[in-house]
Image: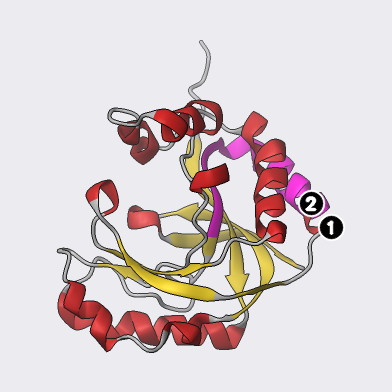
């Protein structure tokens, strides 16, 4: 009898330098009075910018960590500029994100990571399977090819502060100027994911 494969949802991310992470945590705390699903916290809900979310077999984690170690040798810290706040709609309702300008270096990093890790993924995350029901065009193609929609022209680098239980645009009024989130992302991380796109358990963290 074939043993069923043990898989977990993972996020391959960029991690902000300490001062930027602290600013994200403080901003997340400011949003708590509006009713949230989580608040960023050191050692619990890690501030991050996602590059690739995927479902992977636990047995393949050493291969994935090795591939990321090799990729990281060609990467330098990313100095990113935040351009606007976004409040999620539709399937992503409630997410509060400072969005970052897409750079050539960011795009190249995502492409290299997906090329290396996509062949190792084990199916799709449940939330991405659900997105396929009404996906069309490039979004559907990305889900079919990579098991993840935010690739290529749909790549939207951002650092989620929290997820509101209900969309409240006035919540953005308590946040600092968007330039607060300009800064360096200095490490590449592989994390196990929790609910609402959170990074809850570090599996590998690599200095750039």
Residue 30 lies in the magenta stretch: no
- Magenta residues, start to end: 50-70
Secondary element under disc 2, as helix, strand or loop, is helix
Q: Quadrant of residue 131?
A: top left
- Is 101 left, or right, of 165 in this rendering? right
Question: Which residue is depicted at the point 77% across and 68% down?
Answer: 208
| 74 in relation to 5, above or below | below
- Is 60 left, or right, of 1 in this rendering? right
Q: Quadrant of residue 160?
A: bottom left
Secondary element under disc 1, as helix, strand or loop, is loop
Query: Which secondary structure dominates the residues rendered in magenta?
Result: helix
- Is 110 left, or right, of 151 in this rendering? right
Give the Cα separation between the discs numbered 1 and 2: 6 Å
Image spot of residue 147 (x, y percent): 49, 33
Question: Which residue is depicted at the point 51% across and 60% down?
Answer: 201
Question: Which residue is depicted at the point 71% across and 49% down?
Answer: 65
**Observer-nearest of 193 and 77:** 77
| Image disc number at residue 137 | none
Question: Which residue is depicted at the point 30% across and 34% down?
Answer: 130
Residue of label 2: 71
Image spot of residue 148 (x, y percent): 48, 39
**Around disc 2, counting alpha carbons within 10 Å, would you say few (fewer than 14), some (14 to 19), or many (20 or more)?**
some
Question: Is residue 151 visible in this depiction of the protein?
Answer: no
**Around disc 1, counting alpha carbons within 10 Å, would you say few (fewer than 14), some (14 to 19), or many (20 or more)?**
few
Disc 1 + disc 2, Cβ < 8 Å: yes
| 63 in relation to 176, above or below | above
**Observer-nearest of 6 and 162:** 162
Number of residue marks: 2
Image spot of residue 7 (x, y percent): 50, 36
| 18 in relation to 104, above or below | below
Residue of label 1: 74
What colouring method underlies this structural image? secondary structure
């Amino acid at each position: 009898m074939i043993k069923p494969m043990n898989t977990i949802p993972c996020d391959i991310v960029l991690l902000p330098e300490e001062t930027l992470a602290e600013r994200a945590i403080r901003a997340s705390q400011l949003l708590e009075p509006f009713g949230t699903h989580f608040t960023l916290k050191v050692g619990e809900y890690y501030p991050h910018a996602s590059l690739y979310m995927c479902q992977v077999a636990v047995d393949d984690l050493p291969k994935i960590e090795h591939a990321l170690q090799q990729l990281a040798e060609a990467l330098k810290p990313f100095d990113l500029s935040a351009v606007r706040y976004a409040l999620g709609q539709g399937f992503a309702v409630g997410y509060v994100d400072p969005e970052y300008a897409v750079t050539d270096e960011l795009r190249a990093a995502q492409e290299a990571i997906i090329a290396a890790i996509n062949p190792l993924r084990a199916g799709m995350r449940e939330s991405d399977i659900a997105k396929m029901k009404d996906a069309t065009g490039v979004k559907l193609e990305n889900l079919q090819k990579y098991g993840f929609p935010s690739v290529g022209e749909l790549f939207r680098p951002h650092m989620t502060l929290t997820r509101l239980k209900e969309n409240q645009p006035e919540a953005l009024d308590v946040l600092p100027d968007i330039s607060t989130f300009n800064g360096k992302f200095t490490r590449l991380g592989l994390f196990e994911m929790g609910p609402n796109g959170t990074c809850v358990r570090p599996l590998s963290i690599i200095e750039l």
